[in-house]
Image (cartoon, rainbow, N blue to C red):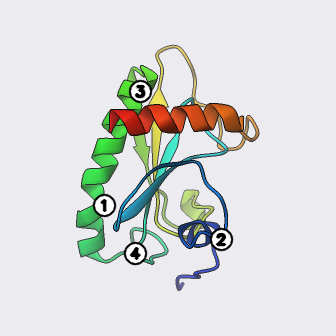
Amino acid sequence: MTYDPTNIFGKILRGELPAHKVYEDDTALVMMDIFPQSRGHALVIPKAASRNLLDADPAALAAVIPLVQRVAKAAKTATGADGVRVAQFNEAAAGQTVFHLHFHIIPVYDGIALGTHAGGGRADDAELIALAKDIAAAL
């Protein structure tokens, strides 16, 4: 399958749709997931066009992985989480729903089960704005 630039993350990267941004540079955009699985769930979205890990340019992957690590550390610090899950899905059969490469940074809290994606509905915008600021400050 080929990359379709009209996907929602492509639109966000082009500024056609809003996002609760945490961080942005020439390589990637970090934003809050509006349908989080836990408090502080963020997404790292490489700017290089690729459907997923399977068709990504290795150089683009090498450039973004240090940012994935930084965001994971910052999210853990900012939220006081007990751990962090980093997830990435490739194709619909594996659970991918947006066909632009992205990494989920999901803070995990002892004794609190992760929600299903979109299972709890859309998150409160004010809370996402505050979390974005807190995670950005921890970067």
Q: Give the residue at mark 2.
A: 16
The x and y percentages for residue 81 are 43, 22
Q: What element carries label 2?
A: loop
Among the two numbered marks 4 and 3 on one chain, the one whose residue lies closer to the N terminus: 4
Q: Give the residue at mark 3.
A: 78
What separation in Å lies between label 4 and label 3 (alpha carbons)? 28 Å
Is 49 placed above or below 66 here?
A: below
Crowd band around label 4 with a 10 angstrom C-alpha radius: few (<14), some (14–19), many (20+) = some
Drawn side of residue 46 relative to residue 73, left or right: right
Query: Looking at the image, which residue sits at the far bottom?
Result: 2
Among the two numbered marks 1 and 3 on one chain, the one whose residue lies closer to the N terminus: 1
Q: Nearer the viewer, residue 66 or 89?
A: 66
Q: Is residue 84 visible?
A: no
Among the two numbered marks 3 and 2 on one chain, the one whose residue lies closer to the N terminus: 2
Among the two numbered marks 4 and 2 on one chain, the one whose residue lies closer to the N terminus: 2
Disc number at residue 64?
1
What separation in Å lies between label 3 and label 2 (alpha carbons)? 29 Å
Frontmost of labels 2 and 1 is: 2
Task: Name the quarter where the C terminus is drawn.
Answer: top left
